[in-house]
């Protein structure tokens, strides 16, 4: 690179503008270059330290995953939510826990797994709808003389399974017949 070059650059360390002799000069002076180098090294060390901490945390979590019995705190860490949320799950009966000692709540690992398995099982029970076994929304309106908003409310309130195909929304005949009989 020619030394006749004169180019304005910003010092990486002190942020002052300076005239550089090459297009890649990063600092305004040797002093700044040294300090910038030190700062870079320090940042590298900090990054190494942060990754180290992350690895330790991950290892701890792995350790939690293989435990059969966990405390509320450990469950909270494992799932990634607050202790309060875990207590809420316990108090509402969604998560089974045992008080083996006063103020010592223990949760079995298999109970945590159940927490996540339940919705899946529910999904499997729902059968896909057959068009021949369904009414369209407008068919229900005509047949049972009900307004669209009233029908939407009924569908919502009764948690009725819906299926959209093309521009039609279908609902199961049996359930609709049962509601309007
Ligand atoms: Zn500088």
Image: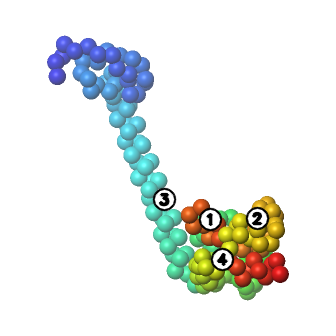
Quickly name the residue at label 1: 168
Q: Can you give x and y, in whole percent of width and height, for residue 119 in the image?
A: 63, 77
Q: Can you give x and y, in whole percent of width and height, for residue 132 in the image?
A: 61, 79
- Sequence-wise, the earlier of marks 1 and 4 is 4
Count neighbours of disc 2 (C-alpha within 10 A) and say few if under 14, some if 14 to 19, many if 20 or more: some
- Sequence-wise, the earlier of marks 2 and 1 is 2
- Give the quarter of the figure containing the N terminus: top left
Q: Residue at x 76, y 67 (%)?
A: 141
In this orientation, which residue lies closer to the viewer: 87 or 115? 115
Tell me which corner region of the image, top left, top right, bottom left or bottom right, holds residue 116.
bottom right
Quickly name the residue at label 3: 53
Q: Residue at x 77, y 80 (%)?
A: 177
- Sequence-wise, the earlier of marks 3 and 4 is 3
Q: Comparing marks 1 and 3, which lies closer to the viewer?
A: 1
Gap between marks 2 and 1 measured at Cα: 14 Å
Q: Comparing marks 3 and 4, which lies closer to the viewer?
A: 4
The single residue placed furthest to the left in the displayed view is 2
Whether tag 1 and tag 4 are in contact, CB under 8 A, the answer is no
Q: Secondary structure at mark 2?
A: helix
Quickly name the residue at label 4: 134
Q: Secondary structure at mark 3?
A: helix
> As drawn, is 42 to the left or to the right of 79?
left
Count neighbours of disc 4 (C-alpha within 10 A) and say few if under 14, some if 14 to 19, many if 20 or more: many
Gap between marks 1 and 4 measured at Cα: 11 Å
Q: Is residue 116 above or below residue 57?
A: below
Whether tag 2 and tag 4 are in contact, CB under 8 A, the answer is no
Quickly name the residue at label 2: 152
> As drawn, is 123 to the left or to the right of 40?
right
Q: Secondary structure at mark 4?
A: strand
Tell me which corner region of the image, top left, top right, bottom left or bottom right, holds residue 153.
bottom right
Gap between marks 3 and 4 measured at Cα: 57 Å
């Amino acid at each position: 690179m020619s030394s006749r070059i004169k180019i304005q650059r910003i010092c990486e360390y002190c942020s002052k503008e300076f005239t550089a002799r090459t297009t890649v000069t990063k600092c305004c002076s040797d002093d700044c270059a040294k300090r910038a180098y030190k700062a870079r090294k320090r940042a590298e060390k900090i990054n190494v330290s942060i990754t180290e901490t992350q690895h330790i945390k991950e290892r701890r979590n792995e350790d939690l995953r293989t435990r059969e019995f966990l405390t509320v705190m450990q469950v909270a860490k494992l799932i990634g939510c607050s202790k309060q949320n875990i207590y809420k799950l316990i108090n509402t009966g969604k998560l089974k826990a045992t008080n083996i000692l006063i103020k010592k709540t223990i949760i079995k690992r298999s109970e945590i797994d159940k927490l996540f398995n339940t919705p899946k099982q529910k999904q499997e029970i729902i059968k896909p709808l057959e068009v021949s076994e369904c009414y369209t929304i407008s068919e229900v309106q005509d047949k049972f003389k009900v307004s669209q908003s009233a029908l939407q409310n009924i569908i919502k309130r009764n948690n009725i399974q819906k299926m959209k195909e093309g521009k039609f929304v279908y609902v199961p005949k049996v359930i609709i017949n049962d509601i309007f009989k």
